[in-house]
Structure formats: structure tokens, C-alpha cells
Image (cartoon, rainbow, N blue to C red):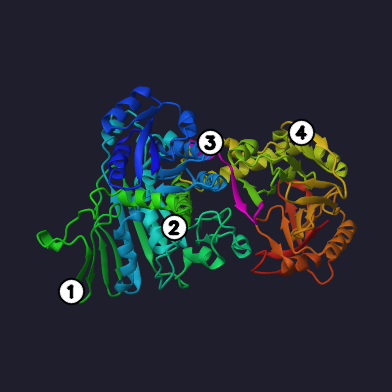
Amino acid sequence: MVTFAIIGTSGIAKKFVKAAGTCSGCKVEAIYSRSKEKAEAFAKEQGLERCFDDLEALAADEDIDAVYIASPNSLHCRQAIQMMNHGKHVLCEKPLASNRRGVELMFHSARENHVVFMEAMRNLHDPGLRIVKENLHKVGKMRHAEINYGKYSSKYDDFLAGNLPNIFNKEFSTGALMDMGVYCVEPMVDIFGMPRSIEACCEMLRGGIDGEGQITAKYPIGIYTTALFEEGVDMWANSSAAANRENIAIRKKETQTKKACEGQTCLSDSNVDAEESAGISAGMDEATGLEVVLRYSKIRDLPVESIIEGDAGTMHIATISNPDCVYIDYKDGSREIFCGADDSAQGGLRAGSLHPENMHYEIVHFIDLIQNGKYPLKYEMYSKISMEIMDEARRQCGIAFPADEQLGFKICQLSEDIFHIEDSTGVGAVLIRGSGKILLFDTMSGVGDLKSYLEEMNLMPDYVVNSHGHYDHTGGNHWFEEVYLHEADRELLNLWREKEISDKLLAKTNQQWQKKLKRTKLSAEELRNSRIPEYFTMKPGAGQAKLLDVYEGMEFDLGNSIWKVLEFPGHSWGSIALWNEDKRILLSGDAFVPVACLFFPESDLEQHKRSTQKLRELAPKALIAAHYPMLFEEREIDLLLQCDSVEGMQGPFSFAYDFLPEYTGNVYILKSIDKGFGGPVGMIIS
């Protein structure tokens, strides 16, 4: 028997209690509210045994197995992680979090704590949506689809009167897209997969919140996909090397005019093989063709019907939030009804749930996953992709939440114990999680609260090591008490802390932020008054950690792995790498990257040649460079080994840092390739 507690006392929480009563294998025992009086009133009304007004007390209660979260959107992430850190399974209302990075944090916590975590997106679990996918091929080649969901909010009149109810308050990460559009986005991802591109528009209301909006998603020609994964996979099986190398990546797509839906989905401890992990785009042909239009609103009622048009007919879905009536009208005039038939109703159709409680199916599925030790990989993928689409739609519409500024990092897992972390400017670091200790290799640019992020992820390092002294590898040192840095680069670290260079970096960051804002639909006045959010602010001179020396042959013992320091001067005087002999993996920092930067005053081409020869003799099987979230294998490493001489290279081509004009150089290109590194391989020399 799975014993539930509920966080939140809204109307959806009451529906959950009623639906749970129809499911065997579970009971709802407790309710949490910040107000003890509200919790007690809810418990009395719903017949619950206990109530809480302290989240930590709820999390620590050993009699509670699972928690259903029905609080405001902006609270989901922190509350879910708090519960999972205490071993609670979590079923969380949609949308899971304020943004994609919050969703990643939540699923990471689920895997770390070996609990089931799932989004309460009820229509994905409804048999009606499975009927849609099973019969979609009957419409023939798909051309156009419309998915609609809009209701006049009961709180809109209050908003028009000048008040600010929670569901129209961006502090709670709400609005039409988050509250209504999610019902359209997630079924689209379930049915069609990841779109090639999207275009979004909305009607903005007072306070920077959207009242209604539209997303147009483009898919390839000839698409027919249900994007199906297994319903659940063994919860904590080890991942295969192939799946780890794939990182279960969503490929980056670009439209002609804007970058859309860019990012990666990276799963920790994946327990599917590479073929399964690629399933989100299975069934898609090349070229373009299918257009899916999503319409959603909180300020008016929209037509409830959704349609999918094909060459042979049109599929009708009565209500996408509750797909209980599905039929196809064929071009020959015939109609095939799959569910929702009622001969006494007009047109031979009705809109009545297949089960009187439409939350029944998601609860049953959640309980089944817990009881059978399965992990909802399919729904993890759908949640991440859907939030990525919603993040891009918000960016295009100029919708920003305060929660967006609280996170500034994304993480993906490269192997069983190695993670790549990237800050909001695209600068990367590598983290190794051993059985006993954790090591962080570089601290990135100093953008965002790195310490809080690592604490949130339960990845606070025991050792912090800089690969060299440049600002984009040492900028976050101030978050830590002690940092290891090669003595030869201490002068370099101090150089980047000088006020003149720090001011240039901050000016460049401000310029980048303004460009980012101009891509939104803010007015000229709003642009002038916009401030750089904390997570996008570079602080290369903020604070100082105690510096400890590293040297050739020094070892860091993490319990189940030992990492040895190897000196590779060339990029800088004191550049180092970390080497694991057992797995023959090298963490190279900037010593070896696709385009070696050898144009700084502290760079030396002759030293780089000697370091490259040392790399040849080392013969690693895999290499991880600082700013690349991927494992380079022997084919790519062989290309790096050829970058120690300008002979045989194309070029030179002019190159300069536009915000540090004293650093210029010539680019010599060895090769320009589409696979592996995805770009040129060569050197930049002075």
C-alpha cells in the first residue's frame, strides 16, 4: 500500500483525493499547507488523518511513501527535491518547474535518491491518447494539426479589477503557456516527438504575464511517429556505454531566422540502450511538411476540439485535456469512432470520460512504477522536451520569471561518474563523482551561484582543481575555500583579476545580455531599464580562495578512481590535465581542444608541440575538453594530435577577441568536419 501526502489545498488537490479513492494499492493520509488552519480544514473535509504545516516534518515522516505536489509552479522544484532527498516518491503537477534547468535538477534528484518522480500530466496516461497514436496512421500522410485548450479563468475578473491572484502572478511562474499551453505541448511531444522548429506569439497582460498564445511547430515531411518508449524500465540498472556516449541528446536545430528549441536532454544512470534513447525522433523522415498549431488561453474559451489532418481523413479529438472522444472522418464520407460513442447523442458522439475520475490513470501508473521497481523514462523525456519547447516559446514572447534568474547551469552525464557542467555563457567544467569523494575540474566564469547549484544537486566537491589560470576556468573559485592551481599560473590568475580586464569582461557580459534581451519583444524603455540578472553576471575578481599547489604525478583519490595530475604547458605556463589510468580517460582542460588557443602572451607553440608528443605517448582512449559536453574518442584524439604544426594546415585567417584587442592571432585550420567536433580543427597562434 502506497501512502500519500499532498502538498497544497487547491481544487486539483481535492480531485486527487477523489481519484485516489478509485485506485487500489494506495491511500491518501496527510495534507500540507503553510497555514495550519487550511491544512486542518482540508483534512476534515476530505477525511484525511493527519495535517502538516512544516515541510521538513512531512519529508522526514517515515509513514509517508509518496507525495503529490499541487502547489504554485515556482515552488515545485524545491519542494520535490526536498521530498526526494528524504526518500519520498513524488508525483508533481504540471508544469514540473519554471524552466528546463529546474526539471533537470528534479530528475537528477530522483536518480540520486532512487525514487520514482513523474509529472502529473493526466492526458498522457489516458487510454484515449493511446487510441489516437494507435490509429493515427489511418489519416494517411499528415499535413496539419491543431491542438486547442482555453478557458476563461475564474480569476480573470479579479485580475481585471486591479488585483493580482496567484495564477496571474509571474512570481509563481504562471500564465497561459504554463497553465494551459502545457496541455497542448506535452500531447504534441507524445504524438509527434521533438519539432524541428517553433514560432511563438502571445498577448501580454499587466505584470509581464501572458493571457493567451500560439505556438506553431514544424515537423519533417512524411512524419508518422508515436515517439513511444517502454512504459517503464528497470529502475536502477547500469547504463550501457553506448547510451552514455549518446547522452540521449536532443539535436540542436535552427530555423532560418531564429534558434529554436536548442539544448540537450541528458539522463543520469540511463538504463536503456542507444536505440531506445534515440526513440524521441524515430519515424521522422527528412524535409519539412507537417505543421502543428497550438492555441491556448486563460482569458477566453477556445474551441475544444483538436484535429490532425491527413491525405486520407481527419482525426478529431474532442478535448485534448481529457481525450475521451476520438474519431476519424474519412475523405469518402465515412466515419470511424474509436471512443466516446453514444448513439443517443447528436452526431453519434459524446464527450464523457472513459473513467469518471480522469486522474485515475496517472495515479494507477505511478503506483505501478513504485510497486514494480520501474522508472518512467518515457515521461522523463517528454517532460524535459516539453519544458525546453516552453522555454523557447517564452524567450520568443519575452516572458521571464524570477525563477529563471535562480539557476544558471545545466548538467549532462558523460559516463557513469563524469559530468559536464555549463554556465549560462556556455563556459564548461567537469565534475567527477567517486565512491568516496567528488572533484570539480575548473570553476567556469564566475557566472551564477555555483556553490548553491552544486549543493542543490548533492554534488559539492571535496577537491576543486583549476586546469590553468584563465578567467573562464577560475572565475568561480571564490565559492570555495581551497582551490588547486599550478604555481606557474598564479601570476596569470592575478592578471585576470586586475580591474581593467575585469571591467572589460563585465562590459562584454552586459553587451551579451543586451543582445539576448533584444531577441525578446521588450520595448525600448524596458530594454534601457533592464538589468543583468545575477546568473548572467561575471565576477572574475570576486573573492579569493586559498590556493594550493598541484604538480606532475600528484594524485586525487576519489574512492573508486584515482586521477593523476599531468603537466601539459603550451596554452598557458601551468596548464594541467587529469588522467585516470584504469579507464585511460584524460580531462584536458584547454590544453587539448579542437581549436588550440596558442595566441596569448603566456602561450608557447614549442611547449605545445612537446605536450602533444606526451599525449601521443599517453595514448588515451577518451578525452574530455573543458568546454565540450562530449567524450572524444580515438578518432577525434588523432585529429588533435595533428595540431602541433602549421604545416599542411589551411590559413592563416585573422582572429581577435573583440573585447580584449590586445589578444589577436592567426587561425590555422587542419580540417573542417561535420561529425565528431562539429567544426574546424586547428590552432590559433600569435
Left or right, residue 318 beside residue 427: left
For label 3, the residue is: 530
Return the x and y of residue 673 as percentages of the image width and height: 67, 69
Q: CA distance from mark 2 to mark 4?
A: 44 Å
Q: Given this view, does label 3 or label 1 mark the residue nearer the observer?
A: 1
Q: Based on the displayed image, in which of its 4 quarters is residue 40 positioned?
A: top left
Left-right relation of 659 to 300? right
Read off the magenta span.
Answer: 402-418
Which of the two residues, 514 or 308, is positioned nearer the viewer here?
308
Which numbered dot is residue 291? none
Circle number at residue 198: 2
Q: Nearer the viewer, residue 593 or 224?
A: 224
Residue 264 spot, x, y in % from top left: 55, 56
Count neighbours of disc 2 (C-alpha within 10 A) and say few if under 14, some if 14 to 19, many if 20 or more: many
Q: Is residue 300 left or right of residue 439?
A: left
Q: Quote the CA–CA distance across marks 4 and 1.
A: 75 Å
From the image, tell me which residue sits under label 4: 545
Q: Are marks 2 and 3 in contact (CB under 8 Å)?
A: no
Find numbered disc 1 in the image and state the secondary structure of the residue it sits on: loop
Please state which amino acid type lies under the numbered disc 2: Ile
Of callouts 2 and 3, which one flags the residue occurring earlier in the amino acid sequence?
Answer: 2
Q: Amino acid at mark 1?
A: Gly
Residue 331 visible? The answer is yes
Per the model, the C-alpha gap separating discs 2 and 3 is 26 Å
Frontmost residue, 119 versus 532 = 119
Return the x and y of residue 151 as percentages of the image width and height: 26, 45
Frontmost of labels 2 and 3 is 2
